[in-house]
Amino acid sequence: MAGEVFPDDFVWGAATASYQIEGAVREDGRGS
């Protein structure tokens, strides 16, 4: 993206869900 120019009103966004980042739901009693 070197040299890319975004408009002044450009808005960045990001999202995730807990199941995508937590993992190991069935380990050590998690998810019980």
Image (tube, rainbow, N blue to C red):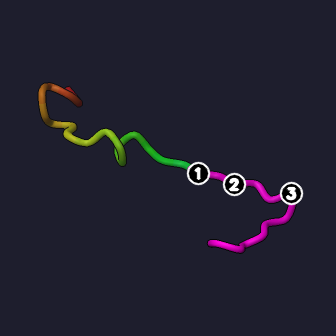
Q: Which of 2 and 12 is in front in this view?
A: 2
Residue 28, x across and y down, in percent? 12, 27
Q: Do the residues labelled 1 and 2 touch (CB within 8 Å)?
A: yes
Q: What residue type is labelled 1?
A: Ala
Q: In this view, does 20 lie to the left or right of 5?
A: left
Please state the horizontal and vertical placement of residue 9, each as a whole percent of the image.
86, 57
Per the model, the C-alpha gap separating discs 3 and 1 is 17 Å
Q: Is mark 1 on a helix, strand or loop?
A: loop
Would you identify the image quadrant in which residue 11 lies? bottom right
Give the quarter of the figure containing the N terminus.
bottom right
Location of mark 2 (residue): 12
Which corner quadrant holds the C terminus?
Answer: top left
Residue situated in front as seen by the camera: 15 or 4: 4
- Magenta stretch holds residue 5: yes
Q: Magenta region, mostly helix, strand or loop?
A: loop
Check if residue 8 falls in the magenta segment.
yes
Query: Spatial distance from mark 2 to mark 3, Cα to Cα?
Result: 10 Å
Determine which residue is flagged by label 1: 14
Amino acid at the residue labelled 3: Asp
Q: Which mark is residue 9?
A: 3
Report crowding for label 3: few under 14, some 14 to 19, many 20 or more residues within 10 A (C-alpha): few
